[in-house]
Image (cartoon, rainbow, N blue to C red):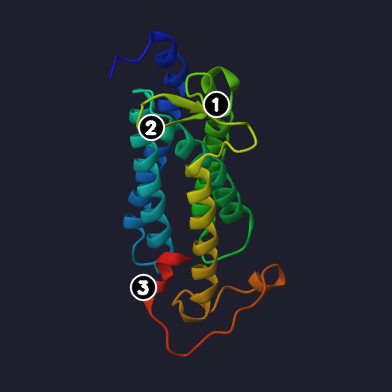
Amino acid sequence: MTAPSPALRAQLRPVIGAQWINLGLCLSLLSVAFALRDSISPAVWVRSTIILIVGLLMLWCGKEMRRGRRWAYVRAKWIAVLGTIGFVGVAALPGPFPAWMRIEQGAQALVFLALTWMLTRPALALFFPRVNARMIHTEKPIPLSDASARDASLDYLRAFIVLLVLLHHSVLAYAVVWPAPPRTFTILPAPIVDPQRWAGFDLLL
């Protein structure tokens, strides 16, 4: 594969910078959680670990985008969009997280919002055009109509999100983080809490 053009590098430079800022926030969150390990709930550790993994995944996608990989661009864009929604939810809604963590999650929401804006700009999208052709044994491209052209990665992402939501709601009653703090259920519907619970299900919340 040819080296990325200087124009693509210039477009990706602020994106990569925001991804490194996000990783720094993730590491800072884990450091504070470790310092306060005797006074925080397991949900803080679970959340901190998950967003660290997401931060590393975003950096990997940024590295592949510099090579012109469209699949990395699509994944980074959707992670940024969904991550913004997730961070805003944690920062705004009551839950098992302390005030200092919700402030940090608000800061990460701003970083992901900036990433969403940068990744959806037409100037960057031009470097990752959608391929509307398929190859047959003759190796000649057969153009597809706009109506039949689909992005398989979006289909996979949609199916994954549907399954993740179903799995999330299936284990709500068996998570150790419940019972939730007071006032939680004035906004969120209260699940049935089973007396037999397992901490492993907290990873899905």
Against 173, residue 93 (above or below) is above
Residue pointed to by mark 2: 20
Against 73, residue 170 (above or below) is below
Alpha-carbon span between mark 1 and mark 3: 36 Å
Task: Please tell me which residue lies in front, 97 or 141.
Answer: 141
- Quick one: label 1 or label 2, which is nearer the N terminus? 2
Alpha-carbon span between mark 2 and mark 3: 29 Å
Looking at the rendering, in which quadrant would you find the N terminus? top left
- Quick one: label 2 or label 3, which is nearer the N terminus? 2
- Quick one: label 1 or label 3, which is nearer the N terminus? 1
Q: Viewer-nearest of labels 2 and 3?
A: 3
Query: Element under label 3?
Result: helix
Is residue 188 shown left or right of residue 43? right
Against 178, residue 71 (above or below) is above
Task: Please tell me which residue lies in front, 113 or 186.
Answer: 113
**How packed is label 1: few (under 14 Cα within 10 Å), some, or many (20 or more)?**
many
Name the residue furthest front. Answer: 138
Residue pointed to by mark 3: 200
Residue pointed to by mark 1: 118
In percent of the image, x 38 and y 80: which residue is there?
198
